[in-house]
Amino acid sequence: MSKLSVRSQPIAIRDVTKTYGSFNALENVTLDIAAGEFLTLLGPSGSGKTTLLMVLAGFTRATSGHVLVGSQDMTRVPPHKRDFGMVFQNYALFPHMNVFGNVAYPLRLRRVSRSEIDTRVARALDLVQLSHLAERPIDALSGGQRQRIALARAIVFEPRVLLMDEPLSALDKNLREQMQIEIRNLHENLGITTVYVTHDQREALTMSDQVVVIDAGRISQKGAPREIYERPANAFVADFIGESTLLPVQAGADGFAFGGRALRATVAPPGGLFLVARPEKMELHRTDMDPAYNLFEGTLHQLVYQGETVLAQVALPEGQTISMRLTSRREVMAALPEPGKPITLALHPEDTVIVPERGQ
Amino acid sequence: MTAASDPALQTGDNAAALRADELRERATLLGMSVPALLIVGVIVFIPVGWLFWLSFTDGDQLSLTHYRRIADITHARIFWQTFEISALVTVLALLLGYPLAYLMSQLSPRWAGICLIFVLVPFWTSLLVRTYAWMVLLQRRGLVNQTLMDLGIIDMPLRLVYNYTGTVIGMLHIMLPFMILPLYAALRTVDMNYMRAAANLGASPLRAFWTVFFPLSMPGVIAGSLLVFILSLGFYVTPALLGGGRVMMVSMKIQQDAGLYFDWGAASALGVALLVITLGIFWVLSRFMRIERLYGGR
Amino acid sequence: MLNRPASDTQITHARRLWLYAVAVLVMAFLILPTFVVIPMSFSDSRFLRFPPQGFSLRWYESYLTSPEWMQATWVSLKVAVLTTLLATPLGIAASYGLHVSRVPFSRVLTIALISPLIIPIIILGVGIFYLYVRLGVVNTIPGLVMAHTILAIPFVVVTVSSGLQQYDSNQELAARNLGASRWTAFRTITLPQIRGSIVAGGLFAFITSFDEVVIALFISGGQNTTLTRRMFTGLRDEIDPTIAAISSLLIVLSVIMLLILVLSNRQK
């Protein structure tokens, strides 16, 4: 299988602001995307992630700020001269052309010779393993096939950047997971700088080199998936990604405390307000544990059986309820007390993260 | 190495340039509608504005003379007859149109499509031709009188044309598609689950229709009726031909005043009155349906 | 068959027979009167009796050999073709511009464009006559074409706008992203997909102009009398069987246009 040659280029977004009337869709967004990086914009709907992608693609004009690709300022370049490939949420394949026609479209616009078009379309279809469907009409394709054709069409002209707008949201769960891996592999293969938009945190964590969490038009945190999950920079990220209970902490002279107990924490920024209590980081306290663990004493409220895991909900005397996730193995469940009985949860200092409200 | 680390690329404030780009793009796009707007403006709005002006002036002075002139019993009769015929045509069109539209809304798309052809063919046929057909059919020895006489229902031919009756029959025929099309569009969107629920709750089919379906179809009934009513108000060709001079509608009077007597003052005052009434009803209509939809848009 | 339920309320076909009967009668009322003209046109007699007496083509001959009728037909055809050629592109451009620019007042502009359908035609006739007298374009082809264009634009705007609303506009974004300018994207992606609406709009424009009577009564005359205007005048004076022949031809024309419309929309 031959490779398409792709120029991987870095992207720099500088102070991009987009306002609609008095509403700020994007507020001074500054972001660097390294050449060849797979970066995901993650955020709830209305956060501005799609607006940012549309600004990159050139379909939405920023109110101010710059988008630079390689060494070129793209801010005022019209979309058709940007040379960015894009995969749309609903694929936007052209129903009046067949698969070949769709994939050849960007090449025809670039006046590529007929024989060259044939080889390049074949290569792109090969890359998404659909060479046998070249003559099919679009409406005869399944959702997954459409997705791949859209991908082939977006990369066949060797774009400088690949943009993807929630491309997997229309697929069912199994196919989605399979496509996540395929897109990831394709990215490894091509090394093209990719900006991917999703509201699905699992997808973001699975696929990306870098995740950018966007909230209300601002970048809330940027980091590798693991960093975003394990070391959320603020309450918004902690709350939005993964399950967590945010426990209000008291700031003292020598660190933070919860329920009168001092907390041993790895991440304890000044202005910290909440302890991020994630169910899967909690352990059932044992007497042989390292005394450095932070302990939470409460009453086992109820056990929620979820198949492979069990969620133990523990009511704290301070009023909050925190959860602990355990595997549903026999001996793990046997160690639990009866509901209504006291229970003590333990959290490793390495997993003890304290976050400020919002912003950085 | 990222692009932004190159200081040469740290370009300055570009908000003004971007705003100019945005405005230019919007102007270009909006500009595409300018030729059409221009021709409509010149050929429609200038003459209509002119009529307004004419109707409110006498010589060079602002005056209500022309309105005072049309506020007499002759004109009142004409307006009354116009309203009466329009209302009659509307009611008859609703009575004939509703059953067909209802049936079409219940049929499979295939059969509904076939029925639709029966509505669209007359809709697409010149109204002059259709009016002519009625002149032929309804004349003294036309097909209708002949059939009635052959069947022994009447001894003498009836006067069916060049009078009120002929006008109403002809207008009804022309207006029926304008009733059926919006009605059908509205009836089709009535959720049949309500009917299922009504049947499930023990309503007889007739009761389910009157208590559930019919009230839900009211927007379509109102839209179709108002459309037929206003189109009838301004109708000219059919009453002029089938009325045989015994029917005088507002539009015919306007034509007479302007075309025969060159009495622009009276014509313009009548025109403005007719226009104001029509636009008023259209405004009511637009509460029930997007105006584009009445003409087959969505 | 008759006892099978016909709808969700379990009403049987038998109990709905009256509804079918009414519907068939209404459809007959809609379509038969018009088509009665066709057999009449082949009558041998000056009097339009039914069934027609004798068979002849004399009324078609009388139409085809009359210089007045031929002249009027040419005027109508010329005006209708020019109107279609003018109204269709103007209407497409306007609908597209208003569709994509999405400015707050684009709805007002749309209503302005379809206002000729709302204003009673007699008012337009009087007003346009008044304007044309001053412009000196009464009884001219350009005058007729302009007047018919404003009547045709609304139909083009309505059909094309409805086509654009059903069309997935992301496709145009995709095309532009892939390297097409706005114009190329419109031409290669949008246009082929709204072709049905455009054909419909064009047919509407043609038939609107060709069948128009009232405005022509005011602004067409002499050399440039349209076919419908001549028919209208003829009908007011006497029932000339030649008009039956012309009417039959017009019916055939309408049916052909409707067929083109149905077929062009079915291809999708």
Image: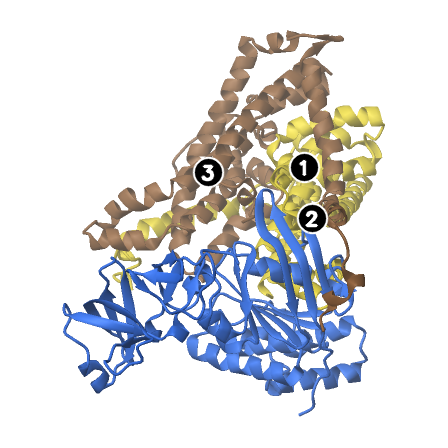
Chain colours: A blue, B brown, C yellow
Apparent side of residue A132 relative to residue A8 in the rendered image (left or right): left
- Give the image location of residue A265, x and y in percent: 40, 69
Residue A27 in the image: above or below residue A150: above
Q: Say few, some or many: other residues with alpha carbon within 10 Å of mark 1 (under 14 / 14 to 19 / 20 or more).
A: some
Q: Secondary structure at mark 3?
A: helix
- Give the image location of residue B256, x and y in percent: 67, 20
Q: Are marks 3 and 1 in contact (CB under 8 Å)?
A: no
Apparent side of residue B205 relative to residue B170 in the rendered image (left or right): left
Apparent side of residue A330 relative to residue A96 in the rendered image (left or right): left
Q: Nearer the viewer, mark 1 or mark 2?
A: 2
In the rendered structure, the residue with mark 3 lies on which chain?
A: B
Q: Where is mark 1, residue-wise? A: C240
Q: Say few, some or many: other residues with alpha carbon within 10 Å of mark 2 (under 14 / 14 to 19 / 20 or more).
A: many
Q: Where is mark 2, residue-wise? A: C97
Q: Whole-Å distance between the Cαs marked 3 and 1?
A: 44 Å
Q: Quadrant of the N terminus of chain A?
A: bottom right
x 66%, y 26%: residue: C123
Q: Are marks 1 and 2 on the same chain?
A: yes
Q: Whole-Å distance between the Cαs marked 1 and 2?
A: 48 Å
In the rendered structure, the residue with mark 2 lies on which chain?
A: C
A332 or A186: nearer the viewer: A332
x 27%, y 59%: residue: A320
Q: Is residue C53 visible to us here?
A: no
Residue B246 in the image: above or below residue B214: above
Q: Nearer the viewer, mark 3 or mark 1?
A: 3
